[in-house]
Image: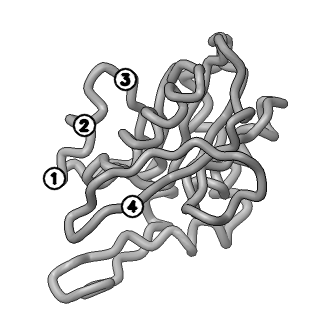
Amino acid sequence: MNRLRATIRDIPDFPKPGIIFKDITPLVKDPAMVRLAVHQLIHPFLGRNINVIAGMEARGFIFGSLVAWELGLPFVPLRKPGKLPYDVQSVSYDLEYGSATLEAHIDSFSEGDKVLLIDDLLATGGTAKASCELVEKLGATIEACAFVVELDFLNGREKLEGYEVHSLLHF
């Protein structure tokens, strides 16, 4: 994990003063590290009854689609409003300074689907919690949530109480 950790770059004062942004672009630039991250994300879930992978816009698409490919499973994108061309279901949630919405096609999941939710980062947990709610609203069950990075000091895991959470790197 130290090799993986070394690919996460700190960007001070982004997107605003006082924030230290955890930049994953050096990680995704290195194919060996991407393979390592994907294998570590799926390892705890091998042999489980997961049949769909979902990922949140936008960096969750990177890791989620690779996890889906590796496992031979379908990938469902959870998108920002207005990006999907078919009928959608949506969930709105509060952010630190406003609100946001996620959408998915109404036929993205089938009753009884067991979903592994993937994203690059767990921070405050708002987006992840809303993603879980959206998946469940569409009739599927969240089997677990997996993240490349978790910012422990923001306590996002608390919003995911009741869900299994797996994170590769903790800051």
The amino acid on which the numbered mark 4 sits, given as a three-letter code, is Ala
Q: CA distance from mark 2 to mark 4?
A: 16 Å
Secondary structure of the residue carrying numbered label 1: helix
Residue 163, labelled with which disc? 3
Q: Residue at x 27, y 61 (%)?
A: 95
Measured along the vertical axis of the image, is residue 138 above or below residue 17?
Answer: above
Q: Quadrant of residue 157?
A: top left
Of badges 3 and 1, the one in the foreground is 3
Q: Nearer the viewer, mark 4 or mark 3?
A: 4
| Residue to which mark 2 is pinned | 159
The quadrant the C terminus occupies is bottom left
Q: Secondary structure at mark 2?
A: helix
Q: Which residue is mark 4?
A: 100
Under mark 1, the amino acid is Phe
Q: Which mark is residue 153?
A: 1
What's the distance in space between the residues labelled 3 and 2, CA to CA?
9 Å
Which dot, 2 or 1, sits closer to the camera?
Answer: 2
Mark 1: few, some, or many residues within 10 Å (few <14, many ≥20)?
few
